[in-house]
Amino acid sequence: AYVAVLLIAIAFAFVPASFVSFLVKEREVNAKHQQLISGVSILAYWLSTFAWDVCNYIIPCACSIAVVYFFQVQQLIAHGAFPATALLFFGYGTSVAASTYVMSYFFKSHSAAQNVVLVINLLVFLLLIVSSVMSAIESTCEANQILSYFFKLLPGFALG
């Protein structure tokens, strides 16, 4: 199941890269500015963007949940864990959308934003492996417990 979770986590690293591309592109061409000048409230703009991203995320989320269920990944579905797994997958999409919106302000180019956000999210999943190794080594176990509190602020780490 560890390999299955890592593969799902790696696949989900591509989701925020798709979110950030449109946000930065809209800022590049001043589409957001045009909407705000036309009378769209800032709240309506961000809520509609968030709703669109969550709706786009539902398809890969549902496919991942179906794969976990149909392939009977016991650690993710046994003993009533399936609803929690589904909620975790859905929660990842909402949390990664919000964190991606914050990251989008650091970029001026949509292609650079997409690549950097993808690499950052892949590196976060590398933290999963590092954390697993640290928890297995007695001398680094305590450091891992402290670091994991900070790592859990990253949606990708919390997913894994």
Image (cartoon, grey):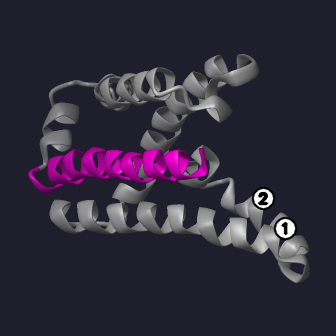
Q: Which residues are magenta?
A: 1-29
Look at 47% across and 42% down and name the residue there: 98
Residue 19 location, x and y as percent? 29, 44
Q: Residues within 10 Å of mark 2 (few under 14, many from 20)?
A: few
Residue type, label 1: Ile
- State how far apart marks 1 and 2 are (Cα): 6 Å
Residue 143 located left or right of residue 1: right
Nearest to the observer: residue 30 or residue 138: 138
Residue type, label 2: Tyr
Q: Residues within 10 Å of mark 1 (few under 14, many from 20)?
A: few
Residue 122 location, x and y as percent? 42, 63
Q: Quick one: SS at disc 1?
A: helix
Look at 69% across and 54% down and name the residue there: 152
Position above or below: 106 against 46? below
Q: Which mark is residue 146?
A: 1
Q: Is residue 145 magenta?
A: no
Residue 124 location, x and y as percent? 52, 64
